[in-house]
Image: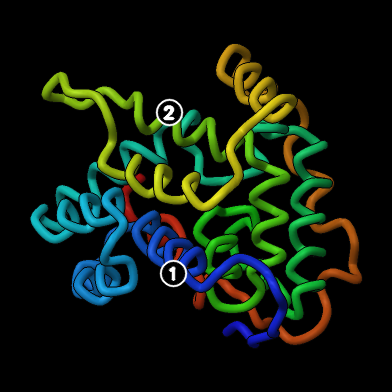
């Protein structure tokens, strides 16, 4: 679990948006559907999240799960991993993932390696909502181009019925609404990502976890407390 640590940073309203985005961008489960009313109560005035929560409430769970897997697990451009957009599956991405673990440690928590990567957007947002908003703000702004790339991919998603826009685009629109307006070099970085995509695969993530100092201490963050992605063994 997370251990709270008080720091100045984004407002309570922003943290509420992050909490809801963290929940609705996770793999849909019975628990998520049951929590929709409570999530809506956190952000009653957010038009984007209200629309997505209505979709989660009205769509059969099996369909939600199928659509989620098709969107996030089978499509590289809709990856929920922040470092993927900048580094692809390359050695440099491994170093970037280590920096995420260092950021968690600086916030006062540890990431337990349990098959999930620490740059998953749901985990980063949960950190900001429950432990350290300042650290999450830094991580999101440092990887803003990737966040925007995901937003563009979801808003441009082509549905089977010919319409455009994934239901989950609403969460990215709400999230981006909590961040500064893109200008200058950041806007240029987004344009480059759109044009070029993530770097080509090279040698995998061999650099990840190379610092043994990051693997000690109490495991206060784990995939058991930050459920992200489809559960192990689910159809992918």
Left or right of residue 120, residue 106 in this image:
right
Q: Residue at x 67, y 68 (%)?
A: 9
Q: Which residue is mark 1?
A: 16
Secondary element under disc 2, as helix, strand or loop, is helix
Residue 67, given in percent of the width and then of the height, sits at: 24, 42
Residue 53 vs 114, above or below: the answer is above
Instruction: Pick whichever of labels 2 and 1 is earlier in the sequence.
Output: 1
Q: Residue at x 87, y 56 (%)?
A: 210
Q: Which residue is mark 2?
A: 153
Quadrant of the image for the N terminus?
bottom right
Q: Nearer the viewer, residue 112 or 1?
A: 1
Left or right of residue 19, residue 5 in this image:
right
Quadrant of residue 74 within the rendered picture: top left
Residue 111, given in percent of the width and then of the height, sits at: 69, 71
Q: Residue at x 23, y 45 (%)?
A: 66
Classed neighbour count for the residue bearing mark 1: other residues with Cα under 10 Å, few (<14), some (14–19), many (≥20): many
Quadrant of residue 194 within the rendered picture: top right
């Amino acid at each position: 679990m997370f251990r709270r640590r008080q720091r100045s940073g984004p407002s309570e309203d922003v943290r509420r948006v992050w909490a809801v985005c963290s929940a609705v961008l996770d793999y849909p489960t019975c628990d998520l559907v049951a929590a929709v009313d409570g999530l809506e109560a956190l952000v009653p005035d957010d038009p984007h999240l209200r629309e997505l929560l209505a979709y989660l409430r009205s769509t059969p769970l099996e369909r939600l799960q199928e659509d989620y897997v098709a969107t996030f697990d089978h499509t590289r451009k809709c990856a929920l991993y922040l470092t993927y957009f900048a580094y692809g599956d390359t050695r440099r991405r491994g170093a970037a993932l280590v920096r995420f673990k260092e950021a968690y440690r600086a916030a006062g928590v540890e990431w337990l390696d349990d098959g999930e990567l620490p740059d998953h957007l749901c985990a980063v947002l949960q950190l900001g909502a429950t432990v350290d908003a300042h650290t999450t703000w830094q991580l999101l702004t440092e990887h803003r181009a990737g966040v925007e790339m995901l937003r563009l991919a979801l808003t441009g998603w082509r549905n089977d019925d010919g319409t455009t826009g994934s239901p989950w685009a609403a969460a990215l629109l709400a999230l981006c609404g909590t961040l500064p307006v893109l200008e200058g070099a950041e806007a240029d970085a987004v344009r480059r990502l759109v044009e070029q995509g993530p770097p080509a695969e090279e040698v995998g993530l061999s650099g990840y976890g190379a610092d043994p100092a990051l693997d000690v201490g109490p495991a206060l963050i784990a995939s058991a407390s930050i459920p992200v992605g489809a559960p192990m063994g689910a159809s992918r």
